[in-house]
Image (spheres, coloured by chain):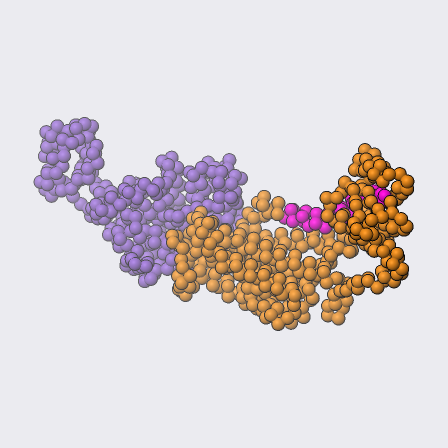
Chain colours: A orange, B purple
């Protein structure tokens, strides 16, 4: 036990000491913070655009457009932050071109301060017949802004057309209003207050993090196994430890590093998401704007299951990776040799995406009980809607059995592999290693 | 007589296609320096690995310290330096030594203390906190040596301990080994460098093609080899002596090294007559001495010229 402990400690300390670990551990939370803060900061920094409606049309059209622009809000909901500061200039008897040019001369000129215009909306009489509105501005390159503008103007023009045709525009607006489906998640008879979008996003992120973490740390076990071979240090180790003690120490050591790093990440994610309203307030953004973003609250239970299945999956896959590493002579060789294991992990991720459509379907339930895939399927299903305890326990139990079988198999291969140099063994030879006493 | 520290009882190990060790038995008494000699491929490393329980013999058994425990379980009492030896390049020297001691069962605090002492003794105290990869090759070998010894084992198994060492470092290591043997510890080392074995070993076993060909104390082996031996050295015209060396009425066997030679006189031949013949041949003689047979000549006589050639070739890449 003391000996295995020495191996665990070595693997842990030597890894935590590296620069990569430090950078990875710090960079993860920073990246997450940026992802969460960026929308908040963007919301705050978007300027109110200064527009002029140059009105050269008869009747209400110009003022309708003006009104529509004034009322436009950033999130298209009443009471939100306004998009535009609007002035209406009536051409009257002056030549249109002259007025237009004088306005254009004031457009996109920062040095004018408040008076600088962002753009000019040209409303002429032929708007109604040719169905075209001209816009002259400094921001025409922005797809989002042009999209919003054309939507608002189109609406105003439509209202004017209806009025001229003698139809009550209010009736029309009320009739064509689309019906929203507001989906709220219910889990086990309880309203969670979480939107479907949000839990979906969480499931997505979790599958990716699992995929990356299993691959990253699994490959670390493999590399360290093969490095002990290239460094010719195995014989010294094996003269003091049983190969299985060495394998166990290595896997537990690297696994603890992974668990530490993931816990730091998960902790940051939980802190940032649960405190995002406070953060938004600190940056002066409206809380409404923040809650409209599909960022989920992450329940602690979901995180715990996630970490548990990361560990189980890690034990399973890293044992397989260690077996591969022990059969190779160089790190380059492992790249090809590890393909079957890597493909299995990738398959788990792919399957997961298919299952997101029907997380409690027949296939999903079965895959929760298949060791190579359960580490993906179970925690992600659990994040979509908490699984019944017995289903969760069954998945854990199957995983534990899977881990034990894999560890036994890998241990048999490892024991022979670490002292073998030369040609890489075939699959059949490795099976023979498993069988020898 | 006291219980032998290592008792190898009729072991055989076969690998796919060939038998590496065949019916080998040997006993290592306590407190001796024991040489396991043989050309490469003779089965030295395989034998040591079986003693250490890294591989199991197909037949026969190994008894250590007269008990039932295997090499791995006795790692606290055994210092093993394998032929294939390396270090973790990224680890700090002191941490590495502590790790080596810990996996042998030593508590870490004691290990740290011992590691410092050994680094001091081997002149590496300035490198304690450096990474292994910063050290020169010679220094790394010293670290390995320290890692083998710092848990103060009762039995040392050193597989080609001096191969690849420069003369200065080899001297340092040799002194350490001799010192340990003086403290009553038992040392087994394998080598194919005969001069070294001859100077250091109390007891020698020579194996060839997996089988034992010589076993005994140094004195016994030399006595058994018998015959009258002459060491010769020339300072000029060595070629002129060639005909004398080939005279089978005077010389039974000659190891001719060009500037020097070791001869075994033919049965009943008179050394005076040999000297006379050599002087008459016109070669310039700088040494003519009646000697005991060297271990090298015994080795070559027992293992054969073919193996001797193999040894010479194998010295290159190993160094």
Which stretch appears magenta?
Answer: A25-54
In the image, A143 versus A423, the foreground residue is A143
The answer to whether residue B30 is left or right of residue A42 is: left
Residue A28 shows in this picture = yes
Q: Position of residue B156 (x, y in %)?
A: 39, 49
Let me know if residue A108 is in the magenta part.
Answer: no
Let me know if residue A36 is in the magenta part.
Answer: yes
In the image, B145 versus B305, the foreground residue is B305
Residue at 29% in and 51% down: B42
Residue at 64% in and 68% down: A392
In the image, A262 versus B253, the foreground residue is A262
Q: Is the magenta stretch mostly helix, strand or loop?
A: helix
The answer to whether residue A301 is left or right of residue A411 is: right
Q: Where is residue B151 in the image (x, y as percent from the top left)?
A: 46, 48
Name the image quarter holding the C terminus of chain A. bottom left
Q: In this view, does A235 lie above or below A344?
A: above
The answer to whether residue A217 is left or right of residue A93 is: left
Q: Position of residue A65 (x, y in %)?
A: 85, 50
Residue at 11% in and 30% down: B281
Q: Position of residue B313 (x, y in %)?
A: 28, 42
| Numbered circles on residues, count | 0
Q: In this view, does A204 lie above or below A43?
A: below
Q: In this view, does A191 lie above or below A420?
A: below
């Amino acid at each position: 036990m003391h000996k295995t402990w020495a191996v665990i400690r070595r693997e842990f300390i030597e890894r935590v000491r590296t620069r990569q670990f430090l950078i990875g551990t710090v960079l993860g939370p920073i990246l997450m913070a940026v992802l969460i803060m960026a929308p908040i900061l963007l919301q705050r920094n978007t300027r109110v655009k200064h527009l002029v409606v140059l009105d050269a049309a008869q009747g209400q059209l110009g003022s309708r457009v003006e009104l529509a622009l004034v009322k436009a809000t950033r999130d298209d909901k009443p009471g939100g932050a306004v998009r535009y500061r609007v002035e209406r200039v009536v051409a009257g008897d002056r030549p249109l071109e002259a007025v237009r040019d004088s306005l254009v001369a004031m457009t996109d000129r920062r040095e004018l301060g408040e008076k600088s215009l962002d753009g000019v909306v040209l409303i002429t009489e032929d708007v109604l017949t040719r169905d075209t509105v001209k816009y002259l501005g400094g921001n025409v390159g922005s797809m989002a802004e042009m999209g919003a503008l054309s939507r608002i103007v189109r609406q105003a023009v439509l209202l004017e057309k209806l009025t001229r045709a003698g139809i009550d525009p209010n009736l029309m607006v009320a009739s064509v209003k689309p019906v929203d489906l507001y989906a709220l998640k219910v889990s086990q008879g309880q309203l969670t207050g979480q939107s479907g979008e949000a839990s979906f996003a969480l499931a997505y992120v979790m599958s990716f993090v699992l995929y990356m973490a299993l691959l990253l740390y699994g490959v670390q076990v493999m590399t360290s196994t093969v490095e002990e071979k290239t460094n010719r240090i195995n014989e010294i180790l094996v003269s003091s430890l049983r190969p299985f003690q060495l394998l166990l120490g290595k896997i537990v050591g690297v696994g603890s590093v992974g668990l530490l790093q993931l816990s730091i990440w998960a902790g940051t994610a939980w802190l940032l998401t649960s405190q995002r309203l406070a953060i938004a307030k600190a940056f002066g953004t409206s809380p409404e704007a923040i809650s409209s973003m599909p960022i989920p609250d992450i329940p602690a239970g979901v995180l715990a299951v996630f970490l548990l299945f990361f560990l189980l999956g890690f034990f399973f896959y890293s044992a397989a990776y260690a077996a591969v590493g022990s059969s190779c002579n160089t790190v380059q060789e492992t790249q090809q040799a590890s393909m079957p294991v890597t493909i299995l992990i990738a398959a788990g991720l792919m399957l997961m995406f298919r299952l997101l459509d029907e997380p409690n379907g027949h296939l999903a339930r079965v895959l929760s009980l298949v060791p190579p895939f359960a580490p993906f399927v179970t925690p992600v299903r659990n994040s979509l809607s908490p699984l019944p305890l017995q289903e969760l326990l069954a998945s854990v139990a199957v995983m534990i059995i899977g881990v034990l079988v894999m560890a036994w198999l890998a241990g048999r291969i490892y024991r022979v592999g670490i002292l073998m140099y030369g040609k890489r063994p075939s699959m059949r030879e490795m099976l023979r290693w498993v069988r020898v006493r | 007589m006291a219980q032998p520290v290592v008792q190898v009882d009729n072991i055989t190990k076969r690998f796919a296609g060939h038998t590496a060790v065949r019916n080998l038995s040997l006993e290592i008494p306590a407190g001796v320096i024991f040489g396991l000699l043989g050309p490469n491929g003779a089965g030295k490393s395989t034998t040591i690995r079986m003693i250490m329980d890294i591989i199991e013999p197909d037949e026969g058994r190994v008894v250590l310290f007269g008990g039932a425990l295997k090499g791995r379980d006795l790692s606290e009492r055994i210092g093993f330096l394998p032929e294939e030896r390396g270090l973790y390049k990224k680890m700090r020297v002191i941490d590495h030594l502590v790790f080596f001691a810990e996996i042998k069962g030593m508590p870490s605090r004691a290990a740290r203390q011992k590691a410092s002492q050994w680094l001091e003794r081997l002149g590496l105290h300035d490198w304690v906190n450096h990474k292994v990869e910063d050290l020169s090759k010679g220094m790394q070998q010293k670290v390995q040596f320290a890692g083998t010894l710092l848990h103060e084992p009762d039995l040392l198994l050193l597989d080609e301990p001096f191969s690849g060492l420069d003369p200065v470092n080899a001297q340092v290591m040799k002194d350490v080994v001799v010192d340990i043997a003086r403290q009553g510890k038992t040392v087994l080392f394998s080598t194919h460098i005969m001069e070294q074995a001859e100077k250091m070993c109390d007891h020698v076993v020579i194996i060839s093609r997996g089988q034992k060909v010589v076993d005994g104390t140094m004195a016994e082996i030399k006595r058994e080899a018998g015959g009258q031996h002459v060491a010769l050295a020339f300072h000029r015209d060595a070629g002129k002596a060639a005909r004398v060396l080939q005279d089978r009425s005077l010389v039974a066997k000659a190891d001719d090294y060009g500037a020097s030679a070791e001869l075994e006189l033919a049965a009943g031949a008179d050394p005076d007559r040999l000297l006379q013949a050599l002087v008459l041949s016109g070669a310039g003689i700088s040494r003519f001495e009646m000697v005991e047979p060297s271990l090298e000549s015994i080795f070559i006589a027992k293992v054969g010229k073919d193996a001797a050639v193999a040894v010479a070739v194998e010295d290159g890449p190993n160094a």
